[in-house]
Image (tube, rainbow, N blue to C red):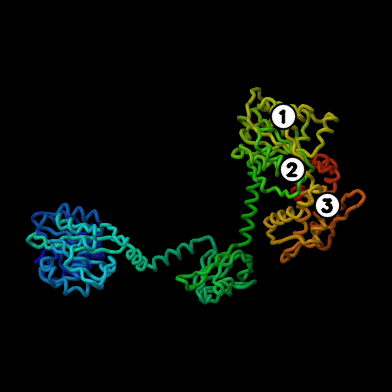
């Protein structure tokens, strides 16, 4: 009777114990496992079989063990057992033990009589998915099952009696016969291009006589397919449910008939509908306004995106994305994700605020953002591209609203300084004292309220980058002199300091003033003018580039759609013709203002700006000066006041040639208040 030790008391070890315990010619002398709670140890105790936790103690010379079955599945443990055991002990993997026991149970002297028992087991072996080949001590094939023939692409003829290398050229069965050592889970590339994983084991009887060997092997492709077939679908479903339930996105799932299967907490939070109101109900029960996208997707088998509708008792405004679930070409249902429009608007507002914060630190426009189809604008654009490639100072000249800042951004982004900071400074927005400390910084104690340790100025912040000095014609003569020193010496001196600080900054200046006239009036330094005017770029007014109007309006509509949450498609021909007969003293900024006002008063379902949507523009044909009027009908008093204030500020702004300092003085308000109102009414 064979004495057998089982190492590994998991599910596999438990099955082996149950199987071998019934064999009359085998005695289980022990079951080993490090885990004291393993199910195999519990079964062993019930059957009266000794248990332990260290297999090495059982493999001593005092304990005669014929067979050790390694059922842990750990290759390292198997190799260690082989090395530790003496030659009288046969160590076999648990998987091989399964095959051996199923095929040869109740047969006397399993290994000795194997070659005589093969024919009686052919039916079983031929119906296994694994390929099996048995050879004698001369490596001559004694048995080869159907799976082996299929994997090896063998014909129907008999291969019994042939040498193993006649069918597997690089077979290692001869080496196994010579070494009498098994080879477990070895990879082998066959002549037909397949790769197999094979285990080869020598067959040795009780007298240590070699009788032959056998190999069990699997096609790697079949292993992968089998793994997919045996995947624990319940586990996958649990994982998917956990992902859906924890998602911040509102998700709903329906079956192929449009019946609700699942929703997550985020869905309940947005719609106000509970599981019992959705699951098991038709897909349209949650919709307040609009059609069911689930039903549409199930019908068309095509996904839909960005559909706006209202859901739930509160008629929540949402955007819906729905996609079909198709498995092996069969529709199984659909999955929908909804987004709260109010949350999107909040995020958009936060993004806009973030952009405002970083606007002074980086350039966000490129030459691709500049609309230029007219020859006048193309010339300016080409000059700017040339200027971007040189270190020269660039002076952007043009009326207010022509896009000088846009050019400044693009020039920086096209230059070799694009990976460094882009600093914007409006020279007219700050008083002289504040502007000086902002531009050049200050030392500690330079003035009352100065920060401890001082502060770096904008020129220092922009080192290696670019600084955009807008409305440079508004600088005082004192500030002009200090700026001239920066241009000449490439150094600055902080307020309250004496030590010069070297800076490497590209200066881009802009003005809508007549600098030549200012020189004659002695309000602008002639030497500074020549420093700045090395590369002047004149940006044409909108009146000079009316051929750009169609593309400009298209671009502005796309931009304002994002700002206002609208879906305006285009401008009608009549509306475009109306705009082309206007002389646009406010240039592109005024054009954006007019289109924005038209979009605000349009109905939410309208998609084309018609002529009647535009503000009333009356043009005096003699002098070409526009007069803006706003028809006020209905609305609150505050709305009427805002409309009047906006129109009045614009008229004064225009009358002062869009000069902010003069406009603030004419309105008798501070320059800061004017900036606030221009921003509030989107007149900038």
**Label 3, on which residue?**
647
Q: Would you call the spot at circle 3 few (<14 residues within 10 Å), some (14-19), or many (20 or more)?
A: some
Q: Are marks 1 and 2 in contact (CB under 8 Å)?
A: no
Q: Cα distance, mark 3 to mark 1?
A: 37 Å
Residue at 71% of width from left, 35% of height from top? 394
In this view, 337 is above or below 397:
below
User: Helix, strand, or loop for circle 3?
Assistant: helix
Q: Quadrant of the N terminus?
A: bottom left
Q: Which one is closest to the eye, mark 3 or mark 1?
A: 1
Could you say where residue 404 lies in the image, as x and y percent from the top left?
A: 73, 42
Quadrant in the picture for residue 230: bottom left
The first of marks 1 and 2 along the sequence is 2
Graded by Cα atoms within 10 Å as few (under 14), some (14 to 19) or many (20 or more), the crowding at tag 2 reads: some
| Image-quadrant location for residue 508 | top right
Badge 1 density bin: few <14, some 14–19, many ≥20, Cα 10 Å: some
Viewer-nearest residue: 461 or 642: 461
Q: Which of marks 1 and 3 precedes in the sequence?
A: 1
- Of badges 1 and 2, the one in the foreground is 2
Q: Secondary structure at mark 2?
A: helix
Where is mark 1, residue-wise? Answer: 483
**Left or right, residue 383 beside residue 333:** right
Label annotation for residue 379: 2
x then y, percent, for residue 416: 61, 37
Q: Position of residue 117 (x, y in %)?
A: 14, 71
């Amino acid at each position: 009777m064979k004495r057998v030790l089982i190492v590994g008391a998991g599910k596999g070890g438990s099955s082996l114990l149950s199987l071998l315990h019934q064999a009359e010619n085998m005695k289980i002398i022990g079951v080993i496992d490090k885990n004291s709670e393993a199910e195999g140890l519990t079964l062993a105790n019930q059957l009266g079989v000794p248990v332990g936790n260290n297999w090495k103690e059982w493999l001593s010379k005092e304990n005669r063990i014929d067979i050790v079955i390694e059922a842990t599945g750990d290759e390292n443990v198997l190799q260690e057992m082989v090395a530790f055991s003496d030659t009288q002990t046969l160590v076999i993997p648990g998987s091989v033990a399964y095959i051996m026991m199923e095929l040869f149970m109740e047969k006397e002297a399993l290994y000795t009589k194997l070659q005589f028992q093969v024919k009686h087991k052919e039916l079983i072996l031929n119906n296994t998915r694994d390929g099996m080949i048995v050879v004698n001590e001369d490596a001559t094939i004694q048995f080869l099952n159907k799976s082996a023939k299929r994997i090896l692409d063998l014909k129907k003829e008999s291969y019994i009696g042939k040498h193993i290398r006649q069918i597997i050229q690089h077979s290692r069965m001869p080496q196994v016969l010579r070494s009498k050592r098994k080879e477990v889970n070895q990879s082998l590339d066959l002549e037909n291009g397949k790769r197999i994983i094979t285990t080869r084991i020598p067959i040795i009887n009780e007298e240590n006589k070699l009788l032959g060997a056998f190999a069990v092997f699997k096609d790697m492709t079949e292993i992968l397919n089998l793994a997919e077939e045996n995947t624990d679908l319940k586990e996958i479903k649990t994982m998917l449910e956990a992902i859906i339930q924890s998602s911040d996105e509102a998700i709903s799932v329906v079956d192929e008939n449009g019946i609700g299967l699942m929703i997550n907490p985020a869905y309940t939070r947005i719609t106000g509908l509970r599981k019992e109101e959705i699951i098991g109900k038709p897909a349209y029960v949650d919709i307040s306004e609009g059609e069911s996208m689930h039903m549409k997707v199930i019908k068309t088998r095509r996904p839909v995106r960005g559909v706006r509708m209202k859901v739930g008792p509160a008629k929540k405004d949402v955007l819906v994305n729905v996609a079909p679930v198709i498995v092996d070409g069969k529709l199984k249902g659909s999955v929908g994700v909804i987004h709260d429009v109010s949350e999107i608007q909040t995020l958009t507002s936060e993004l806009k605020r973030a952009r405002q914060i970083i606007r002074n630190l980086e350039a966000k426009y490129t030459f691709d953002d500049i609309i230029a189809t007219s020859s006048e604008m193309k010339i300016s654009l080409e000059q700017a591209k040339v200027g971007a490639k040189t270190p020269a100072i660039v002076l952007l000249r043009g009326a207010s609203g022509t896009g000088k800042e846009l050019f400044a951004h693009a020039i920086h982004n096209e230059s070799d300084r694009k990976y460094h900071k882009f600093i914007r400074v409006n020279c007219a927005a700050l008083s002289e004292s504040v502007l000086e400390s902002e531009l050049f910084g200050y030392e500690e104690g330079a003035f009352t309220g100065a920060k401890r340790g001082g502060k770096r100025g904008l020129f220092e912040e922009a080192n290696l980058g670019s600084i955009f000095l807008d409305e440079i014609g508004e600088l005082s003569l004192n500030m002009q002199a200090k700026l001239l020193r920066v241009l000449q010496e490439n150094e600055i001196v902080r307020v309250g300091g004496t030590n010069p600080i070297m800076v490497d900054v590209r200066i881009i200046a802009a003005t809508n003033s007549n600098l030549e006239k200012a020189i004659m009036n002695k309000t602008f330094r002639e030497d500074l003018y020549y420093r700045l005017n090395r590369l002047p770029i004149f940006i044409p007014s909108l009146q000079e580039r009316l051929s750009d109007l169609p593309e400009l309006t298209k671009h502005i509509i796309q931009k304002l759609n994002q700002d206002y949450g609208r879906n305006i498609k285009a401008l009608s021909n009549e509306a475009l013709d109306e705009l082309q007969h206007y002389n646009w003293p406010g240039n592109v900024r005024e054009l954006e203002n007019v289109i924005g006002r038209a979009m605000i008063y349009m109905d939410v379902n309208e998609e084309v700006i018609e002529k009647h949507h535009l503000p009333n523009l009356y043009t005096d044909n003699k002098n070409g000066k526009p007069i803006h009027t706003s028809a006020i009908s209905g609305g609150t008093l505050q709305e009427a006041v805002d409309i009047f204030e906006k129109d009045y500020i614009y008229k004064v702004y225009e009358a002062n040639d869009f000069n902010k300092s003069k406009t603030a003085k004419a309105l008798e308000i501070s320059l800061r208040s004017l900036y606030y109102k221009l921003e509030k009414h989107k007149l900038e």
